Image (spheres, coloured by chain):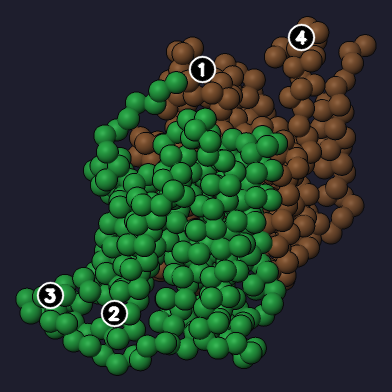
Chain colours: A green, B brown
Amino acid sequence: MTLSDIWLFLQQGLLSGLVTGSVYALLALAIVAVFKTTDVPNFSQGEMFMIGGYVALSLIMTGYLSYAAVIVVTLVAVALGGALFQKVVMERVTGSRGVGVQLVIATLGLAYMLKGLVRQTGLGDAPRSLPPLVSNDAVMIGDAALTRLDIAIFVVAVVVMLLIWVMFTHTRIGKAMRAVGMNPRAAQIVGIRLSRIRMMVWAMSGLISGLAALLITPKVLITPDIAHIAILAYAAAIVGGFTSLPGAVLGGLIVGVLENLVGLFISTNAIVVAPFLAILLTLVVRPQGLLGGKVQVKKV
Amino acid sequence: MKNFSTDQVALLFLLGVLCILPFTVTGYVLYIVNLLMVFVVLALGMHIVIGEAGQFALSHTAFYGIGIYTASLINTAWHPPFVVSVLAGGLLSALLGYLIGFLALRMRDIYLALATFAFGEAMQWVFLNWESVTGGSNGMRMQPAEIFGLKFTNDIQAYPFVIAMAALMLWITVALSRSQFGSALRAVRESDVAAMAMGINTRSMKLAAFAISAAFAGIAGGMYTLFISFIHPESLGFQTTILILTMVVVGGIGSVRGAVAGAIFFGLVSELLRQALSIQEIIYGAILMGFMMFKPRGLFADRRQRVARAIAGKVRP
């Protein structure tokens, strides 16, 4: 490998990594938002993402709706599903015992059920992908080749992140979510309804998952196992500190770039271990994550 | 005459059935029983980390796989008595578990769940791709385990040893759970802060529980090599971890007899539904969700009873 090859690979890895990383960043944002407000690491994030892809796919295959309508219906469906899960299942689990382990198991159960249901429909038997909205023409940036689709993915993801940021900083509902994340009891005292906020956060997480699915599925083939992508989002969240929203975005981009560099320099086969390596490295070097602040001593 | 408890009666009955079994049934049934014993040990291992210590780890299958490959590679290379190779698998798993736990438990508890989740995926990749050692996606044919020159070539030869090991692991679990160490683990489970106030080093307790559970999974892997001659990494994925989790959850998180009963029941279910992966996924998913909603302590929850009896001075709490 000559020096110019390495330079080319670096550019390509960085840019492709930012594209896929922006999608991981979206999923990591959803994971962190849910964790902050409900104290649950959502192990069904990947499956919510997958279900978004399949809802869109089945709507397109029936052919009644235009693409724009499909997008809207998909987003609404996944968001409603997320809200419903929090309202029906998670509230009930919290009510009947309500410690961390039980909540985590409930999300794992949801993940498995969704995966099984998709497999049962037979839609997942063959890998498929959605028709792209934007053409696949190549665009050269420096020496790296991207497609128009890639650029569209990145731009949309960044816009969505900005919207989320605006929501958290400038709207009542976003501020309420942050308040619940900081101190649920205090938030309750000032009149915020915990269960409603938690439901909204889950709906938001569903919305983001559906969006991520719509963004990436024209680019990659979906199968019921695509939910594995979530593992990269967990890694992203840990790299970012797990309680920091900007950290989740940063982590997502880093993990995306890391994954692409591993794929280019080592082997595409080795991509599977990239998230584990990223998690381990973070835990060794900076366990609180990049933007996780100081290590806090747990208070009573 | 001494009064026997329900548990003791159940155990004696089970022992009786297990003794008669080899003389009455075919090899396939013995294979199933062997397999169920492996599941029992796996479930006991998960019971220790989730049930006793209240921590969440999702790498059980990875350690199970490490146990299988370690034991069978040692068998192939040196032909030691099987106890050596099984213990080696358990030891290696425990060491790796300790290392991962040491790193993951530096921050919050859920990092253990996330790191072990990623570790499980990474290990399946290793099993699939380290072809010179594991045979990769072709799977690996294993040399039979042996003890003092007796090679285990069928299920009935392995049967007594598999049963004995499962019984031993069950005894160890119960002993652990009744020891001071077990009490400390439960204290950590109920409240970190209260446990710390009593002078329990919570982090090292969690770490120990995780390492022990990894060792159990490794030993279960070693037991598997006693009666199986072929292993494929396909079966060492996340679905096996979910299966074991279902066993523990339905039996009752925190109950040893629940873990054993769950392992036997869902071991049979998974064997019956071998061909129907999607149905299995739906069932396990629905069970995990449903039990957490309506019966979070599982079917064998008995804490209230035990507390009541303890107050009456009948048993040690």
Are marks 2 and 1 in one subunit?
no
Indicate which disc residue A6 carries.
Answer: 3
Which of the two labelled residues, at mark 4 and mark 1, occupies the earlier sequence position? 1
Query: Where does residue B46 sit, x and y in percent of width and height?
Result: 59, 41
Name the side, left or right, on which B2 lies relative to A196: right
Indicate which disc residue B311 carries.
Answer: 4
What residue is at 42 percent from the left and 87 percent from the top?
A: A133
Q: Which residue is identified by label 1? A: B194
Q: Which residue lies furthest to the right in this view?
A: B1
What residue is at 27 percent from the left and 69 percent from the top?
A: A18
Q: Distance between the residues labelled 4 and 3?
A: 72 Å
Name the side, left or right, on which B316 lies relative to B219: right
Marks 3 & 1, CB-CB < 8 Å contact: no
Which chain is indicated by disc 2? A
Compared to A60, does B199 lie above or below? above
Residue situated in front as seen by the camera: A122 or B88: A122
Is residue A81 visible in this depiction of the protein?
A: yes
Q: How far apart are marks 2 and 3 (CA)?
A: 23 Å
Q: Distance between the residues labelled 2 and 1?
A: 53 Å
Q: Which residue is identified by label 2? A: A151
Tag 3: residue type? Ile
Q: Is mark 1 on a helix, strand or loop?
A: helix
Is residue B32 visible in this depiction of the protein?
A: no
Q: How far apart are marks 4 and 1 (CA)?
A: 21 Å
Compared to B9, does A43 lie above or below? below
For mark 2, does the 10 Å Cα neighbourhood hold few (<14), some (14 to 19), or many (20 or more) residues? some
What residue is at 20 percent from the left and 77 percent from the top?
A: A12
For mark 4, does the 10 Å Cα neighbourhood hold few (<14), some (14 to 19), or many (20 or more) residues? few
Residue situated in front as seen by the camera: B260 or A11: A11
